[in-house]
Amino acid sequence: MGHGNRTPSAALVAVLSASLLAPGAACHLDSLLSPPRGVHPTGPDSLVQLRRDSSTLIPTGGSVPEPSIVMRAALRDTGLTGPVRLELEIQPVGTDFQGQATAASDPTSSGAHAYVSVGGLKNNTGYHWQARVVDQTGARAWQPYGENPEDAADVRVAAPDTVPAARLVFSGQPTTVTAGTTMPPVKVAVVDGQGNTLTSYTGSISVSLVNAGGATLGGNPNDVPVSAGVATFSDLSITRAGGGYRLSATSDGLAAVTSNSFAINPDAPDHLVFTVQPSNTQPNRPIQVAVHDHYSNVVTSFTGIVYMGFAHDGSPLQNATLEPGGTQRAAAAGVATFEDLKIDQLGIRYTLDASTNVTKDGTSGPFDVTP
């Protein structure tokens, strides 16, 4: 049935470029009319089917591992000088031809060469196809491809049996929160190679900090059961402030995956800490006081005033004073610096008290004021 593969004639060759249309959505071209009187083009010559590289021949009844093929044809003219095009109809085996084009080339002039790519073919499916020539005078009769019965496949799509490897993805990324605060639920999904959630997957997933820097991951980060392809971590928290944190998700038999980066911001101001203590040996060394939250993170957003006074007056008569000009400093990024703080009396075992209006006080270590 059909004429098979013939030797190309030295006549008009048309090249087509078209996409396969879904069944029932065929092109109804204005030129598909009953042929008028006059000269008609002959049928397509040397119909061949090729792999998508446009050069590897697919034998009649052969298979391809990808969902696309290329059709090539030579169109022989009988003296017409106008444009000619080729129309194709391709159907799954078992579906009768409808006599309507599912792909058509652009008009082509004598001597042109081109190819038609047909995509969207289904895996494990056989197809048969037919072609016809159309010019301004009308359409030639359809000519089936191949010398095989139309209930046999001209070409079959048979992609290799590959089961895309399951992999992990963060479907709900960790977000920046305040230290000690439970972050919004973090979700890790098990998906296939196309990103589809594998709802039948059973197992558990764990998460951990990639670059902890001394931080610990609170909540329940280990062995969370997968439900409908997703593990949900609903109570994660970190108390150590910092930036550039990431989570790593792991599950038995699957490669680990890393989340987007996120940060942990300090909590509210809670207490003061002397980060640079008063010194006996370096009397002019600046004293520094940091504003900490409940988790001992420096509250970098704090820019209020820190006040300095005695916690213990180490002078013999306990009548020492601090020079007033050095007893108040505004914090910068949560740290107040007191330069050249002066005490007017000699003494031993002095201690200083740092305070703000919103935190617990902080007390320095002991120091002496000597001649």
Image: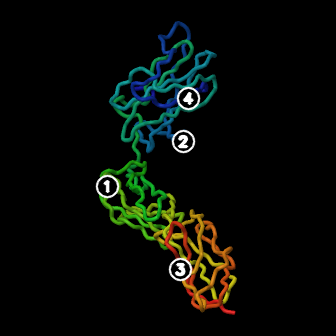
Looking at marks 1 and 2 on the same chain, the residue that comes earlier in the sequence is marked by 2
- Real-space CA distance between mark 4 and mark 2, rounded to the nearest whole angstrom: 15 Å
Residue wearing tag 4: 16
Image depth: mark 1 or mark 2 in front: 1
Name the front one of labels 1 and 4.
Answer: 1
Q: Which of 27 and 77 is in front in this view?
A: 27
| Residue under label 2 | 53
Pointer 4 with pointer 2, Cβ within 8 A = no
Name the secondary structure under disc 1. Answer: loop
> SS of the residue at dot 4?
loop
Residue 11 screen position, x and y as percent: 60, 24
Q: Residue at the spot x=41%, y=34% of the render?
A: 154
Q: Quadrant of residue 305?
A: bottom right
Find the distance from the CA under tag 1 to the CA under tag 4: 46 Å
Q: Which of 367 and 60 is in front in this view?
A: 367
Q: Would residue 186 be found to the left or right of residue 362 on screen?
A: left
Which of the two discs, 4 and 3, labels the residue nearer the N terminus? Answer: 4
Image coordinates of residue 17 in percent, x first then y, are 55, 30
Numbered disc in front, either 4 or 3: 3
The reply, left or right, for residue 73 in relation to residue 328 is left
Foreground: disc 3 or disc 1: 3
Q: Name the residue under label 3.
A: 363
Q: Residue at x 52, y 76 (%)?
A: 362
Left or right: where 341 falls relative to 89: right
- Determine if residue 129 is in view: no
| Residue type at the position of mark 2 | Asp
**Between residues 18 and 335, which one lies in front from this camera angle?**
335
Q: How far apart are marks 3 and 1 (CA)?
A: 57 Å
- What residue did someone put label 1 on? 201
Q: Which of marks 3 and 2 is nearer the N terminus?
A: 2
